[in-house]
Image: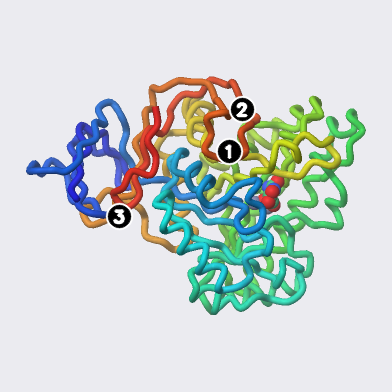
Amino acid sequence: MRTLIKQAHLHDARGDHGVHDLYLRGDRIEGVDLGGEVDHTIDAQGNLVTPAFIDLHAHLREPGQEEKEDLASGLAAAAAGGFGTVVSMANTTPPVDDPGLVAALALKAERLGLARLRPAATLSRGLKGEGLTDFAALKAAGAVMITDDGIPVADAHLMRRACEYAQDLGLVIQTHSEEPSLRQGGVMHEGAVSQRLGLPGNPAAAEAAMIGRDCEIALLTGARVHLAHVSSKRGMQVVEWFKAQGAPVTCEVTPHHLTLTDAALASFDPIYKVAPPLRTDEDVAYLREALRRGVVDNIGTDHAPHTRAEKERDLLEAPFGIGNLEVTFALLYTELVGSGALSLERLLELFQAGPARVMGWPTPTLEPGEPADLVVLDLEASRPVTPATFRSKAKFSPWSGQTLRGWPVMTLVGGRVAFEGV
Ligand SMILES: NC(=O)N[C@@H](CC(=O)O)C(=O)O
Ligand SMILES: [Zn+2]
Ligand SMILES: [Zn+2]
């Protein structure tokens, strides 16, 4: 099959290429302005066409928690968000600690024809934080990352052994860096707001201390350690310090930690309950600055859907997590690029070359022969967030009703339309 994307404003990691007709052949990019017969034409006039985004961090909940999300709804939501590739977290029921399960997830996802799934597997057997899983077998089955995300690895020696093992195999270890004994039962950031509301707080020190431990272990072992969802100024400063020391660490920030603060918890609405917690204005400003300065390697969504019933429990009982796959690009384009805080090039890099580099994958480009994984972005489109229309099963959002500008209108994966929007 041959596809023409007409009048596309092309952008990739090599730069801005201006407006061209882009041709796809089968699942690959063929070239620009070639002419000739095509089977399918897509009009992209006025839109930006760029490599589909990569999310290194989404909770798709399959197997076992399909009431929250499943592969079909989660990968459809990802495609609607402009993502062509998603690394799924392994804190499912049962946890993804078995090579057979990794292979089954990958096969099922491939048949769906939505975003590509790249499964993560757990670091510890049963997510129990005691014995290691069989990384070699998990990698052979298709796991691309090792992580107990959802639960911090409390035992430093276990983390060391995991790093030694992963280093031998060239696997990335992703951490959920919060020191459990310091975090305790905190349900929100510990600070002036938690004190006023009388809610148990989780101090930034819990994050910064664990990031320090995990970076030390990365230095000690030479393993590639990816620090998920860095949320605090202190945590980010620790990452910066270790990067300057040459530690083989990379880090992620999430859309919610870049746009929301602990002030939102004054509503007592569990929709804002997330781990690590929403921090202060000062933290948000520092994370934004770290994005700009290039300290941050990628934006990962940490899309963490739950049922409405679970999120309608009281703040102490409700589970941690925010669903955001479908709004992430528009949210950050509006709030960061729209305000002049970040360039569009840098924002795109954080969804494309950045995550690819973290994983050791090739930089996605529009060069002939590359996979035809593309997103068509309408940067002028302005509309409110309408959770009722989400592909995700979690049809509620902290940004509900907020008017955002710059939306994905189509996502192609391997030359096939995985999402087509308004
Ligand atoms: N981020 C969250 O608040 N929740 C995640 C777990 C995690 O990412 O640690 C979840 O699985 O619900
Ligand atoms: Zn986590
Ligand atoms: Zn997570």
Q: Label 1 crowding class (10 Å Cα cut-off): few <14, some 14-19, many 20+?
A: many
Q: Position of residue 151 (x, y in %)?
A: 74, 58
Colour theme: rainbow
> Which amino acid does the dot numbered 2 rest on?
Trp
Q: Could you say where residue 126 lies in the image, as x and y percent from the top left?
A: 72, 69
The numbered mark at residue 406 is none
Q: Which residue is outermost to the left? A: 36
> Amino acid type of disc 1?
Asn
Residue 233: in sight, yes or no?
A: no
Q: Which mark is residue 324?
A: 1
Pointer 3 residue:
371
Residue 187 in view in this figure = yes
Is 363 drawn above or below residue 166 in the view shown?
above
Q: Which mark is residue 399?
A: 2
Depth order, front residue of 59/32: 59
What is the secondary structure assignment of the residue under circle 1?
loop
Q: Are marks 2 and 1 in contact (CB under 8 Å)?
A: yes
Front residue of this view, candidates 70 and 102: 70
Q: Is mark 3 within 8 Å of ligand 3?
A: no
Q: Is residue 286 above or below residue 30?
A: above
The image position of residue 298, as x and y in percent, is 52, 49
At numbered mark 3, what does the secondary structure look like: helix, strand or loop? loop
At label 3, the amino acid type is Pro
Q: Please provide percent x and percent y for residue 46.
A: 28, 26
